[in-house]
Image: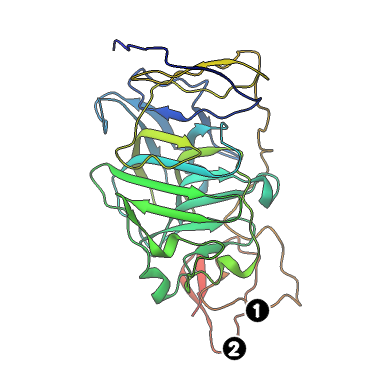
């Protein structure tokens, strides 16, 4: 595609200033920029460039995710802006979310510890966030909390957006509509975020990866297209420059263009924030001892591999929902 550019301004930028990342995959899949991410193990999942399916144009990234944890597979980038992070992706899923816990976006988060993640996925048939260290969910998986989120439609591309703030703010939109249950932060009232707000949280994302991970037997096929990562929201119809980079010199020249913003990254500068690949599970990173407090209502209390609390607060009991997940109800 012919891209016309016109020089409008020249400016000096400080080191490590962030340029918006945008990718429509019409030029193919550049694996040096969009790398595969499959920590710990990978059995059955795959990533490919689909040249017959796209939200705009004809190309997209296809994720074939297998059932079970080792069937996970992701593709993404370590180029993440400091501070506020806004992400927009058009997502097409073959199968609807079920009661099982799954992830379709995972983000290594250094504030949670080595190789720990902030995850976006589903459970109880709704979209939800999951914080790996304490297994907190947003929203609470109570009947009221479930009612404040929504499922992910299948069979066509959906515009999924979210905002992660360094102060703990989370905002989420589906096709431009805010999802109340997936909104939390300072000054924001969310009565269905008690699990999430029981501990302070200041995210420090070091990567953003799109794909599939299942903690039960759910398999799924998803397509991702027109991905934008930046420091401000672009919306579902936002601009989509096709080349992106992170500037890393102390003073460089950048050009503002009419139809496409191009920022050149020196080839000699790289980021080295690769997460240590230690085993990752859906449970809390701490092992519960005999004197650990009882799990709160709606929290996890059992399942295959679970090492957290197995007793529930007074008035609730631990009930098995599936072999991988029991909940205080």
- Crowdedness near tag 2: few (<14), some (14–19) or many (≥20) residues, C-alpha within 10 Å: few
Q: Relative to residue 291, is residue 328 drawn left or right?
A: left
Q: Please state the horizontal and vertical placement of residue 230, each as a whole percent of the image.
A: 48, 36
Given the current orientation, which residue lies at the most extreme bottom position?
A: 315
Q: Quadrant of the N terminus?
A: top left
The colour scheme of the drawn protein is: rainbow
Q: Nearer the viewer, residue 160 or 7?
A: 7
Residue drawn 32% across the image and 12% down it = 3
Answer whether residue 68 is visible to the viewer in this image. no
Q: Relative to 101, is 105 above or below?
A: above
Q: Residue 96, labelled with which disc?
A: none
> Which residue position is annotated with label 1?
294
Q: Which quarter of the picture shows residue 23? A: top left
> Mark 2 and mark 1 in contact (Cβ < 8 Å)?
yes
Residue drawn 37% across the image and 52% down it = 173
Mark-to-mark CA distance, 1 and 2: 9 Å
Q: Please state the horizontal and vertical placement of residue 105, each as a whole percent of the image.
A: 47, 45
Q: Relative to 181, is 113 above or below?
A: above
């Amino acid at each position: 595609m012919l891209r016309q550019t016109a020089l409008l301004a020249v400016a000096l930028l400080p080191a490590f200033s962030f340029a918006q990342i945008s990718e429509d995959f019409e030029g193919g899949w550049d694996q040096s920029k969009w790398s595969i991410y499959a920590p710990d193990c990978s059995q059955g999942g795959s990533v490919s460039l689909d040249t017959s399916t796209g939200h705009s144009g004809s190309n997209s990234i296809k994720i074939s995710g297998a059932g079970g944890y080792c069937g996970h597979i992701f593709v993404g980038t370590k180029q993440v802006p400091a501070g506020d992070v806004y992400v927009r992706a058009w997502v097409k899923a073959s199968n609807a979310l079920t009661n099982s816990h799954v992830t379709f976006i995972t983000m290594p988060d250094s504030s949670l510890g080595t190789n720990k993640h902030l995850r976006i996925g589903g459970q109880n048939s709704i979209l939800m966030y999951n914080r790996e260290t304490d297994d907190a969910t947003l929203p609470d998986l109570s009947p009221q909390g479930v009612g404040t989120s929504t499922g992910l439609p299948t069979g066509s591309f959906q515009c999924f957006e979210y905002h992660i703030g360094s102060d703990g703010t989370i905002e989420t939109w589906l096709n431009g509509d805010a999802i109340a249950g997936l909104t939390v932060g300072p000054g924001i009232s969310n009565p269905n975020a008690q699990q999430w707000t029981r501990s302070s949280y200041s995210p420090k994302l070091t990567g953003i990866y799109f794909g599939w991970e299942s903690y039960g037997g759910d398999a799924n096929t998803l397509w991702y297209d027109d991905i934008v990562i930046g420091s401000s929201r672009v919306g579902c119809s936002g601009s989509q420059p096709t080349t992106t980079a992170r500037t890393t010199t102390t003073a460089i020249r950048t050009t503002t263009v009419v139809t496409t913003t191009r920022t050149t990254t020196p080839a000699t500068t790289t980021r080295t924030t690769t997460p240590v690949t230690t085993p990752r599970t859906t449970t809390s990173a701490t092992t519960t001892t005999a004197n650990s407090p009882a799990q709160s209502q709606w929290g996890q209390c059992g399942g295959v591999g679970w090492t957290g609390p197995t007793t529930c607060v007074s008035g609730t009991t631990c009930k098995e929902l599936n072999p991988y997940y029991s909940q205080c109800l």
